[in-house]
Image (tube, rainbow, N blue to C red):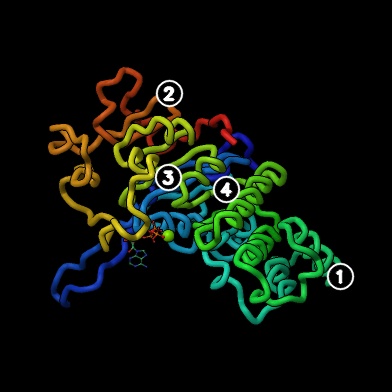
Amino acid sequence: MRPDLPLLQAESLSREFDLPGGGIFARKRRLEAVSEVSFSIGRQEVLGLVGESGSGKTTIGRMVMRLLPPTRGRILFDGVDLTALSGRALRAQRRRFQMVFQDPYASLNPRMRVREIVEEPLVVHGIEPDSSSRRDRVARLLERVGLSSRDMERLPREFSGGGRQRIGIARAIACGPELLVADEPIASLDLSMGAQIINLFSSLVDTDAMSLLFISHDIPMVRYLSDRVAVLYRGRIVESGPTRDVLDDPRHPYTRLLAEGTLPEAGEAAPSNAGSEPGPTGLCAFLPRCDRALPECRLAPPPRLSEGEVREVLCHLPRGESSWSPVTLLSQGSPSDVPATPSR
Ligand SMILES: Nc1ncnc2c1ncn2[C@@H]1O[C@H](COP(=O)(O)OP(=O)(O)OP(=O)(O)O)[C@@H](O)[C@H]1O
Ligand SMILES: [Mg+2]
């Protein structure tokens, strides 16, 4: 363990996908779903990742989980470059980071009993080989997530959406991970169930010392749970910093819309290919929708500016303000390594 380092550091992550179409002789069209994304997550810290549908949130979550290789960039977990690991070395690290999925209906095997679902990762990683102590551990895990040891022999379909999400969380925390990646974990739940799951995450961070990458459209929940927030627009982080600073005093016009809640619901506004095809101009992707654009926005790519090495924005707007300065090469890509005061 390297307590001197952030638990997770994503460095200049990019991910391209081939687009369908184009004949044999045509040049392949590629979509850059994630472009040069850098962030870090400290120990016991929650980073909220927000942005409209198609902005690249899931792609980033899957790259962090090593479910999808980045086209470029590195992911350091506790100082170890995950992108360079494979086989046994990767398996050894895997139990340290786990994912909680959006849809607790689709992510649990309907034929498996709760005990089998929760103990499977323990078996895979060879933790608690003795079946009776494994059973005890499953019972403790179920109680930890607000279920009961009496639920062990039940099937997922016997639970509500919130109950199923608790089973998914019990499975995710079975091997004692240090980082959870939760991709829209409350999107399919009603308000009160969602709030209970958010409280469970909060207690896993505070009591069990976990870190969390919290991917969500739900700005009030992000505000409640996250220490810092990163705002994604078309595959790029356009603003990041301590949650309250960013959401109460947004500097990027896109963050402003997001914080005011004036953006259309997920999926409604995003163009079908919401990432960006790598283009020669590099101009701001938000320009066509921006109501505060300056003449220079049409002439040059937006600069990455920082304030106090804690906040960052990819925009021309704050350039004239003395507190904002261009991100220097030294801190480029890792300004968020500066620990922030928890806002929870
Ligand atoms: N396997 C893939 N092949 C081709 N394109 C993909 C693939 N996965 C994602 N994309 C594209 O990459 C972009 C980002 O997708 P992603 O799922 O990461 O967005 P998201 O922010 O998670 O959206 P949502 O809020 O709807 O979940 C989208 O344009 C999507 O169509
Ligand atoms: Mg997604």
Using the image as rendered, state which of residue 170 and residue 96 is in the foreground.
Answer: 170
Q: Secondary structure at mark 1?
A: helix
Mark 4 or mark 1, which has the lower sequence index? 1
Query: What amino acid is labelled 3 in the image?
Result: Glu
Q: Secondary structure at mark 2?
A: loop
The quadrant where ligand 1 appears is bottom left
Rendered view: 53 above or below 113: above
Q: Is residue 9 left or right of residue 278?
A: right
Mark 3 or mark 1, which has the lower sequence index? 3
Query: What amino acid is labelled 2 in the image?
Result: Gly
Query: What amino acid is labelled 4 in the image?
Result: Leu
Q: Residue at x 29, y 20 (%)?
A: 321
Mark 3, residue position:
11
Using the image as rendered, state which of residue 239 and residue 150 is in the foreground.
Answer: 150
Q: How many discs appear?
A: 4
Label placed on residue 159: none
